Image (cartoon, rainbow, N blue to C red):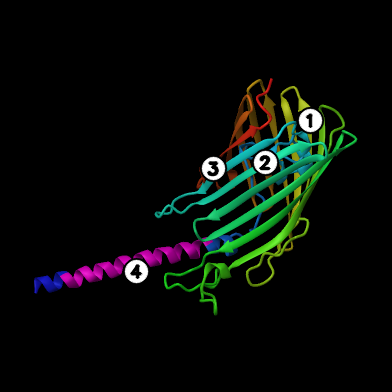
Amino acid sequence: MKRKEKFFFGCLRAKCVDFAENATRCAKILFLFLSLFVGQPGWTAFEESHTGGRATALDGAMTAATGDVFAMHYNPGSLCDLMEPEAGLYYGRLVKGFDDGGDTSRSFFGWASPSPWGTVGLSYSGYGAADVYSEETLSLGYARAWRERVRWGAVANYLRKSANTNSSAGTVLDPVTGDPVPGAGSPADLSATAWDMTLGAQWVPSDRWRVGVTVAHVLEPDLGFYGKDSVDRVWKVGGGYDTRWGMALVEGSYQNINDKGQARLKGGIEKTMKYVVLRLGGGVGAENYSRLTTGVGARFRALRVDYGYLLPLDTAKDDSGTHQISVALGLGGPDE
């Protein structure tokens, strides 16, 4: 009798463990999709985010900043500042806490090089929410100077959005309702691709002044899984002035999300010394957008490492902030 009871409770325990694991995974999927599609009123796919430690330390106020390999994400016109080929790499974990190791991460790899016909660049960037949701961007950029003081650039972007909504039973679930999708049996059934473009220009009237303008998501691509889900166009204008305390940068942006205009004002200062760069910034705007940022950069010969820290002030009690580090390497040999 005891042996049968032991066998019975062992089977019951195994079933409970399987149920708990399946329930946990379903809860994660539901939580992530609710937060991505429902829980954030202003959320949209491929929304603006910081790529690299330098941009993070300045809260993304990069429209009028000097350019590097990461400029394709901010103002492609500033690619003209490159004097040698440069490669850049960035990877960051944004959210942690899942027991199975699932995290929200962002990555970037890019290359840009000047040539007699202008500056060209190629980059890949990705965003992933555990194994449930991902966004990928493949970019090809070109920039050219006009009469030395004016720089313009354009980037063609291939966008791909995908979702893995497989339940434990092997069926695909709708990300909003949680109901099975008829005729869908694999994660590939939930994916969308589109082409997009970013345009940018800078005017450098003197060695101390810079003015920049950028239009992102020019084509307002549709990346809906079932219905229309367009990425809204973003307009940016910025200025920079080289003061005795460092390069002061300011940027204003406007985006119409879900027929509701959202304006933001960002700024920062960047103090360059011999081998070290100190940065401080922040921003305010619609939808309780409020941030404080800081960071530092270091350069040794052709290698540059940038660190940025971002603290959302509207959720400071529950958020310890985001740390981001990026690496850039000049490929034209060490500096003299």
Could you tell me how far apart the alpha carbons at marks 4 and 3 are, in whole angstroms?
Answer: 35 Å
Is the residue marked by circle 4 packed among few (<14), some (14-19), or many (20+) residues within 10 Å?
Answer: few
User: Disc 1 residue type?
Assistant: Tyr
Q: Secondary structure at mark 4?
A: helix
Query: Which residue is identified by label 1?
Result: 241
User: Disc 2 residue type?
Assistant: Trp
- What segment carries the magenta color? 7-32
User: Disc 4 residue type?
Assistant: Phe
Of circles 4 and 3, the one toward us is 4
Q: Quadrant of residue 85?
A: top right
Could you tell me how far apart the alpha carbons at marks 1 and 2 are, in whole angstroms?
Answer: 28 Å
Pinpoint residue 313: horizontal percent, then vertical percent.
59, 44
Q: Quadrant of residue 117?
A: top right
Q: Secondary structure at mark 2?
A: strand
CB under 8 Å between discs 1 and 2: no
In the image shown, does 131 or 229 lie closer to the viewer?
131
Up/down of 185 relative to 194, above or below: below
Report the quarter where the N terminus lies.
bottom left
Q: Secondary structure at mark 3?
A: loop
Up/down of 116 relative to 271, above or below: below
Pinpoint residue 173: horizontal percent, then vertical percent.
51, 72
Which of the two discs, 3 and 1, labels the residue nearer the N terminus? 1
